Structures are given as C-alpha cells and as structure tokens.
Amino acid sequence: MIQSSMPETQITLEAGVEGGLFDAMSRKLAEDLKMHGIDVNIVNRNDSLNIVNDIADNKSSVDAGFIGSDAPETDYGHLRQVGTVMLAPVYLIVHRDSDLEEIVNLQGRSVSLYPVGSAPWYACTNIFDAYGLSFAEEKIMYGNSSSIIQDVTNGKSEAGCFVDASPGVRDDISSIADDLTNENLHFLSIPQSQAIQAHQKFLHPTVIPSGTFRFFPPLPKTDIATVASSITFVARKNLSRELITMISYSFTQEYGGSTFWNQNEQLPSTNLIALDPFERANDVYADGLPWVYQRFSLHVASFLERLADDYGTIVVFLFALLSIVSTFGLPTPYELIINTRPWRVRTLLKSIDYRTQRSGQISNRDRKRLNRLEKWLNKESVKIEDVAQQVRQLQDKALSQ
C-alpha cells in the first residue's frame, strides 16, 4: 500500500536543438520542478518535429516535451496535452526596398528558413503550401532567427519566414524581439490567415498592429494579418497526476501573465490544438494549485492523494460495515476482541501447562508470557479470578523448578 502510493519524481523531456527555444523552455521547467524534488532529464534532437513521435512511442524513454504543431491523429491514443503555453507569431519579411508586396509574389524567389524538420520550419512550410509556393533548393538558406533577419537585411535572401517566440517568454530566454526594430524590414500580410486555421488548427489567426516594433515612425507601417504557431506541452497519457499538477502550476506562473500576445490571459490553455487534455491540468488552470499541494510537500501531498484514490473505497466500505453492525446491535470488531480475551487467555494457559508437564520444566518464553499476563491482569478493572489463579499456579511451578 505504502509503495504504490509513493509519487513519481523523475521525468524525461525531449527538446529541439540544444540552445533553441524548446531547449530553453525545457530547462526553465526543469528549474521549477527541481524546487519540488522532481528530477528532469533533457534529451535533444535537431528535428523537433519528431519529438511528438518519440513521446508516443511505448519503447521510448521520453515522457513529454514541447511541440509546435498538431499531434498526428495516429498518436492520439498514446498522448494527452498539458496545454498550450505560447502563441508564436509568424512574420514574412522582405527588404524595405523589395518589389515583393504580397505573399503570392514569393514563388521562385530566394528565401531564408529554419532547418528542415524543426517546428518553425514546419509552420512556415505549411503557410507556403497553402498558397502553392515552392522554392528551388539552391535558393533556400537555412539558419536561426537572427540569421534569417540578417539574410534579408543584407540582401542574401529576398524573403524570410521568421517565428517570433519572444512575446511569450522571459527576457532571459529570448531577446530576439530587438532585431525586429530593424528599419530595413518590411512585413507581408497573410490575408487568408482565418482560412489557414481551418486546415491547420495549430496555426491561429492574429494581427500585428501598426507600430508594434517601433512606435514612430511606425513599424510595421500598417496592421499585418498573420498566423501564430501554438507551442504546446504534450505527454504520454499515463503521466502521473502529481507531475501533471506541478508542470501545470509551473506554466501558470511562467506563461500565465499578460503579454502582448496573451493580453486576455487565456494561456495556458488546452483548447488550441486537437488533442485530448489531462483533466488535472484544466483543474489547475481554472482553480489553481490543489489545497493538499499548497499545504504539504510534493511527496506528502501526492502520497495522501494517491492513498485516498487507491484505498478510499475500502475505507468507505469499512465505515459502512461498522455502521450496519452498530445499527443492528451486533458486536463491533473491537468488542469481539475484548469479549474473547478471557477465552483466549485460558487457551494460552492450557497450552503453557501442557508444554510444562510434557517437558518437566517451563521454558523462558512461556515464563515471559506469564509475566505479561500477570501485568495485564493487574491492570484489568474487572478481575478474572479463575484466570488469575491459573497464572499463579503456573508461576509457582516455575519457581519450584
């Protein structure tokens, strides 16, 4: 009972490339969980698009991780979401002197993208595919957020697709937003952003208001329609409730505050991708940290919660049984123990007497039993004379040996 009620205090997270967004977010989560006695192991892979597959794989040691896409429908039976914690807007950028004015004009041009297989690359290619855009491999340059902006600014690429994570994370994780104040940048709209979500639920329509990156002269000059990629934490469906509780609580503290892209404080949320949520995560987002976790350490709180869940039915049944016994005037278990004491003592004395007669002497073990019986008899408020007499007789035999 005790062993089965002990909490899980270890979890393995898979992140993207080391030093990338998912890696930074995973390490921040690890810091939060460590304060509660939870050890986090982080493994990295460059193609972060496949993180979800490793989590769903029963043979994998990976328990959870951040993803920037919808989970494949084939994995729905193996996964649950803890929630979307961030919306990362997608910016299509060109040089301010460029003749490119609309997204459809990008066909066949040179473009800077994130590495193939990464979550930002997946978001950008979904947008391009929606417009039927394709690019020759020799005209594609791959890099990180900073290099994409630099490629467009320096003219190495005619366009770039940039995923901005900075509005949803703390300054110590990302400061890339400063690069977006570059006066040589021009932003292209995605006019069908509402329709894109109908095909890719993880891409959410949004608007970049004029003056977002520089108030005056305003940058961008006009409101820009675009989409934002949801960053969601998913886990294997049997992840323990105590881990879900503390992870959800960490997300409310880290990502629940108001930011430019979370002004209504709707994040964290389990309503933004097509994957069933953990109900405990919804409970934490709605009502905060459960009372038992506020009052006790993780180990104690989890133990009490598991004990109540695993054995609560048995406890209720026992109380119901005792109630029935009391109602019908039947003896309770305690009364049965008390009322049968004289009989049990007499039986013990007979066995001691039998062994003594058979061996011709009383053993040390039986001698100690007699001493305990004598002490018990002296404490009893109701004297049992025949039992007391038997004890004295046996003790006299022991002294005469």
Image (cartoon, rainbow, N blue to C red):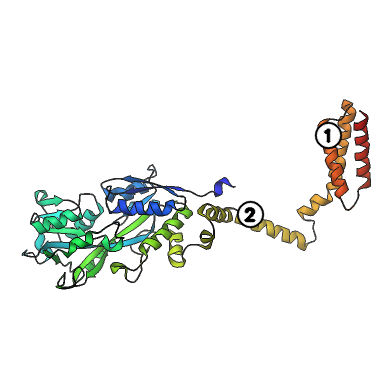
Of residue 147 and residue 307, the one placed in the foreground of this image is 147
* 208 relative to 99 in the view: left or right: right
Report x, y in % for residue 245: 46, 57
Residue 270 in which image quadrant:
bottom left
Q: Where is residue 323 in the image (x, y as percent from the top left)?
A: 72, 61
Q: Place residue 129 in its image quadrant.
A: bottom left
For the image, the number of numbered tags is 2
Could you classify mark 2 by the number of other residues whose Cα lies within 10 Å: few (under 14), some (14-19), or many (20 or more)? few
Residue at x 25% of width, y 59% of height:
175
- Compared to residue 198, the image places residue 362 above or below, namely above
- Reading the image, the residue beneath label 2 is 314
Q: Can residue 329 be seen in this view?
A: yes
Report how far apart the C-alphas of labels 1 and 2 lie in the structure.
38 Å
Among the two numbered marks 1 and 2 on one chain, the one whose residue lies closer to the N terminus: 2
How busy is the neighbourhood of tag 1: few (under 14 within 10 Å), some, or many (20 plus)? Answer: some
The amino acid sitting under disc 2 is Ile
Callout 2: SS = helix
- Marks 1, 2: nearer the viewer: 1
> Where, by quadrant of the figure, is residue 215 drawn?
bottom left
Taking depth in this image into account, of 267 and 147 the one nearest to the observer is 147
SS at badge 1 = helix
Question: Residue at horizontal 80%, vertical 54%?
Answer: 335
Viewer-closest of 142 and 350? 142
Query: For the point 16% across and 62% down, which residue is it?
Result: 92
* Residue 392: % across, % down: 92, 39
Name the amino acid, label 1: Asp
Name the residue beneath numbered marker 1: 366
